[in-house]
Amino acid sequence: MRFFLFIVPLAVVMTLGNGCGQSGCGGSADNGPEYVQHIEFPSDATLEEKVAMAAHLVPSERQLAWQRSELTAFLHFGINTFTDREWGNGREDPAMFNPEGLDAAQWVRTLKECGFTMVILTAKHHDGFCLWPTATTSHSVASSPWRGGRGDVVAEVAHACADAGMKFGVYLSPWDRNAECYGDSPRYNEFFVAQLTELLTGYGPIAEVWFDGACGEGPNGKQQVYDWDAYLAVIRRLQPEAVSAVKGEDVRWVGNEGGMGRETEWSATVITPSIYARAEENNRLNGVEPKSPDLGSRERLVTARELFWFPSEVDVSIRPGWFWHERENAEVKSLERLADIYFSSVGRNSVLLLNIPPDTDGLLNEADVRRLREFAAWREVTFADNRVKRGDCLHRLKAGESVEYRLKSGSVIDVVMLCEHIERGQRIERFTVEALTSEGWREVAHGTTVGNKRLLRIEPVEARALRVRIDECRAEALLDRAGAFLMAPTAAAAVVAPSYEPIAAEVAGENPVTLDAGGIVEISGFAYSPAGGEFLPETAVRYRVWVSVDGESWSVAAEGEFGNIENNTVVQVVEFPQALQARYLRMEGSTLDDRTAVVRGEELEIF
């Protein structure tokens, strides 16, 4: 085996003696103890001691396998698909559920062909409608006409995944707006454990169990208290290889639903998983919450009592909403937007969980499939030719040291890839990348964390070599792989017209806001879009809308809630059951904490 040695001024090149492409760390000199998934710092530990311990925090085997998956798929499908809503109220008639052409093999086959490694199905959303014939409730597919009441969506997807060699996961909403026992905490916890047990025993290996934290009041007016310890115990007993996500101890929500990971994304974090009783106190002490920009720096370690290997998952939908809506067929995210999301998630030490919702026929819609294939082709072309020679050598570097990589002859690049050997932890805190051009070395990129994978978009440059300098690290950095690529082009994002026709109207009043169309028109519904696309404390979560012919006599046209608007501030479209003749439309709203919302005229349209 030939080794190339570059003379690097003021830097040292160090390569592990176990050769290229090995998964072990060979002759690693930092022989400190490893801490799997969790560290509890001694009460008198100094910052330097905490940093030294943090360098040896490593993922569990199930976490490591999950982080390597990189690209996974969410399938939001259920009764909401047929009611054209994002959040159901639990009072839906199961007879509405009848996806006559349902083909789970089409879902899984398409996703596998497009590079996805796992499928997570919404086995039950907040409406409580179960996609399997559960023994716990009649609010399920067993009460629907689909497959003559003998269907099981969970089974069909699980079998399709098994046949295709894909991993399978389930989303089970803790919030259940149909269950009579919800709010009677002990009874509902038994109910939920029974549902979870059914899913984890009847459908083969489960790779991920996904819980969100949605919670409300039950019919008794009491807020449900979830028994997270019991839920986690069921997962560990029945599916020990499954990661528990979001409201779990293995996988962390990135903090938004826009597809954006942090510029500095730590898997070794000070944030305590919220299912633990001590989470609130620890996170308050550390000044962090899921949306905090910094979850693992040295500054955060100062106050930390504990450190968790708690990697980031970025969930985002390929459409504005999470469930399929026909009006959104023309609003599938552009290839350019998906490329941005890929760089901001997979390229920032996260796993991308991309939602692709099946339609009422029970198929992945052609608009989504077409974009998925374009996305897959773009990735294939972009990353097919790594211009780095021997980029899979494992290098051990101290702060201030560098490693150089030769590039293939005639290389023009605009993407740089760096990967840490996360089997031994996450250690790189700050780095610089330089390119050797015809005019000498010049800096082309710099950053903070690397983790499982860091992708850096740079200005196109013709280069003969790359030099990566570790500016700051914990113990010794273990640089596992490096790459340099030329990104395939993406078409400019198309300007998508709204799927409704707005009616010109003037603001005629405030608190509550009133729109005046200037004359009697046929109003089919309204659209609400939070100002600046930002969720604020005064943003409307629930609404009531009236219409009037003369501005004096009013009738209620619609009332309800904007499902998930806190995390997904897209345009909220509400269609009336039937078009109404009116001149005025008035809306009032309430906030997440039941205060009167501030609704502005520019946030509202009628159509």
Image (cartoon, helix red, strand yellow):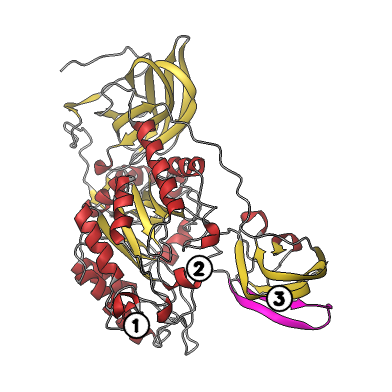
Q: Earlier in the sequence, mark 2 or mark 3?
A: 2
Dot placed on the residue nearer the N-terminal end, 1 or 3: 1
**Which residue is found at the position 41% from the left and 50% from the top?**
369
Residue corresponding to mark 1: 143
Q: Label 1: few (<14), some or many (≥20) within 10 Å?
A: some
Q: Is residue 366 above or below residue 482?
A: below
Q: Secondary structure at mark 3?
A: strand
- Taking the magenta stretch, the answer to whether it contains residue 422 is no
Mark 2 residue type = Glu
Estimate how packed mark 2 is, as few (under 14), some (14 to 19) or many (20 or more) residues with alpha carbons within 10 Å. Answer: many
Q: Position of residue 134 (x, y in %)?
A: 28, 79
Q: Quadrant of the N terminus?
A: top left
Quick check: can you spot residue 302? no
Residue farthest along the bottom direction in this orientation: 220
Magenta-highlighted residues = 542-561
Residue 21, horizontal then vertical, whole percent: 20, 31
Residue beneath disc 2:
86
Q: Could you say where residue 263 lies in the image, as x and y percent from the top left?
A: 47, 41
